[in-house]
Image (cartoon, helix red, strand yellow):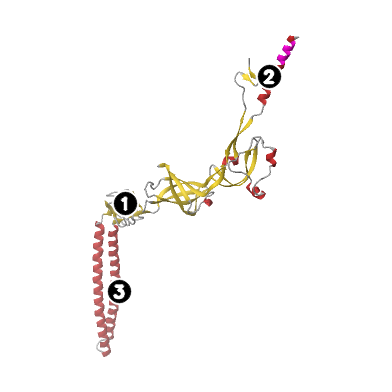
């Protein structure tokens, strides 16, 4: 009888252990929630873009005459002043043209003087013959011949005056070409590009060749950025800008929006708009052509409640919201306001179950969102992530204790 009782007890214990293990394994995993506190701070909303640095005013210096470069007086990075000579084209041919046109001009002036003298003589002869024809001393034909000669003299003077004007213009053009053979800087600035060398022939027959590129003032620069059409409505003149360049990855430079151009730039059906950012470059660290990664500050709020953007994306897995969550009344703010908000986050109730709370959001950045209204308070814990946990039996044992 004793043996029977002992056997029965053993069987009961084994069955109990098997059932315990079975229900332990089948027990649903407990949800683990990662939370973050609602805190106060600053939120900066921004638009990102890329662009290239350039001088505010860049002047391309060319030549209006053709010839051979005889001298260069500046090189890359040379500072120049307005009116300073920076290159010289061989002036020999231009000097010869000046002398030739000058001689033609002097000859035309002499021709004008002769034509005027002929006019005076023809006029005297005409007046004398007019009196003689009245007295019947000369024939009418002689008077007519004198009148014709006078008219020819008047025309001769006008032709001589035209020749003088024409040769004067040619002389002036030759002098101008000679002056253009000396290339001078049109602005104060710095030479950032040189396209010619001594001995090189430049031809200005069809278009003006560029000899130098001068940046007027490298202490004032600008960034030409491309902003997507979805973001351009948030950008306005005067907004502060921060940007970085690859040469100084640890430093953030400052600027501000100075111009928003209305002309669209369409590339493969993508519409962007050019936004000009003004930059102060007093230390001359920035150079033309550098690539800038720009962040335009479109809105900023200080000392506001903020939550991680992940809290708005969180949804409980498996429909674990409590009945209380589904019927919980709104404690703060008007119903209309919450209806307009249409967003909610989740907090944990006393039973560690997720409870939805409606919120009104404001501005945002990449990681945080402003809480403009709703039931959340500072230091509330909002859920940002959910995971599951289940205790596993320890090695060599089970839920009922270690094996013997």
Residue at figure coordinates x 71%, y 18% from the top left: 15
For label 1, count other residues whose C-alpha is less than 10 Å away and answer few (under 14), some (14-19) or many (20+). some
Is residue 188 shown left or right of residue 25? left
Magenta region includes residue 65: no
Question: Mark 1 highlights which residue?
Answer: 79
- Work out whether mark 3 precedes mark 1 in sequence or the reverse, and give the earlier one: 1
Q: Nearer the viewer, residue 212 or 53?
A: 53
Query: Residue most toward the bottom?
Result: 135
| Quadrant that contains the N terminus | top right
Q: Disc 3 and disc 2: Cα gap in Å?
A: 133 Å
Residue at figure coordinates x 45%, y 51% from the top left: 256
For label 2, count other residues whose C-alpha is less than 10 Å away and answer few (under 14), some (14-19) or many (20+). some
Of the residues tagged 2 and 1, which is closer to the observer?
A: 2
Question: Mark 3 highlights which residue?
Answer: 158
Magenta region includes residue 6: yes
Q: Quarter-wise, where is residue 381 in the image? A: top right
Question: Mark 2 highlights which residue?
Answer: 17
Of the residues tagged 3 and 1, which is closer to the observer?
A: 1
The rendered magenta stretch, by its main secondary structure, is classed as: helix
Residue 50 at x, y = what percent?
46, 46
Q: Secondary structure at mark 2?
A: helix
Q: Secondary structure at mark 3?
A: helix
- Work out whether mark 3 precedes mark 2 in sequence or the reverse, and give the earlier one: 2
């Amino acid at each position: 009888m004793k043996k029977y009782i002992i056997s029965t007890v053993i069987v009961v214990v084994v069955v109990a252990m098997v059932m315990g293990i079975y229900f332990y394994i089948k027990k649903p995993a407990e949800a683990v929630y990662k939370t973050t506190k609602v805190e106060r701070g600053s939120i900066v909303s921004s638009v990102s873009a890329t662009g290239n640095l350039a001088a505010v005013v860049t002047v391309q210096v060319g030549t209006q005459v053709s010839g051979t470069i005889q001298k260069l007086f500046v090189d890359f990075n040379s500072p120049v002043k307005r009116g300073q000579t920076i290159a010289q084209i061989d002036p020999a041919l231009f000097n010869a043209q000046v002398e030739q046109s000058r001689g033609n001009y002097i000859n035309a002036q002499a021709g004008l003087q002769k034509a005027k003298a002929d006019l005076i003589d023809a006029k005297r002869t005409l007046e004398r013959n007019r009196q003689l024809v009245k007295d019947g001393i000369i024939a009418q034909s002689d008077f007519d011949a004198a009148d014709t000669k006078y008219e020819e003299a008047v025309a001769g003077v006008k032709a001589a005056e035209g020749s003088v004007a024409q040769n004067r213009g040619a002389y002036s053009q030759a002098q101008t070409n000679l002056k253009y053979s000396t290339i001078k800087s049109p602005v104060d600035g710095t030479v950032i590009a040189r396209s010619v060398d001594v001995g090189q022939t430049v031809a200005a027959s069809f278009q003006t060749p560029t000899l130098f590129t001068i940046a007027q003032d490298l202490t004032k620069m600008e960034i030409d950025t491309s902003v997507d059409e979805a973001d351009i409505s948030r950008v306005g003149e005067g907004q502060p800008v921060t940007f970085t360049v690859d040469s100084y990855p640890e430093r953030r430079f400052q600027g501000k929006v100075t111009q928003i151009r209305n002309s669209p730039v369409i590339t493969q059906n993508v519409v962007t708009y050019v936004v000009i950012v003004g930059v102060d470059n007093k230390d001359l660290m920035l150079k033309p052509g550098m690539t800038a990664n720009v962040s335009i500050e479109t809105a900023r709020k200080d000392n506001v409640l903020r939550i991680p953007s992940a809290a708005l994306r969180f949804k409980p897995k498996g429909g674990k919201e409590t009945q209380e969550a589904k019927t919980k009344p709104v404690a703060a703010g008007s119903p209309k306001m919450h209806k307009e908000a249409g967003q909610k986050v989740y907090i944990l109730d006393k039973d560690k179950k997720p409870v939805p709370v409606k919120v009104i959001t404001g501005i945002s950045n990449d990681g945080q969102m402003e809480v403009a209204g709703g039931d959340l308070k500072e230091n509330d814990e909002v859920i940002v992530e959910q995971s599951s946990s289940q205790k596993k039996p320890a090695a060599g044992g089970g839920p009922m204790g270690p094996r013997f």
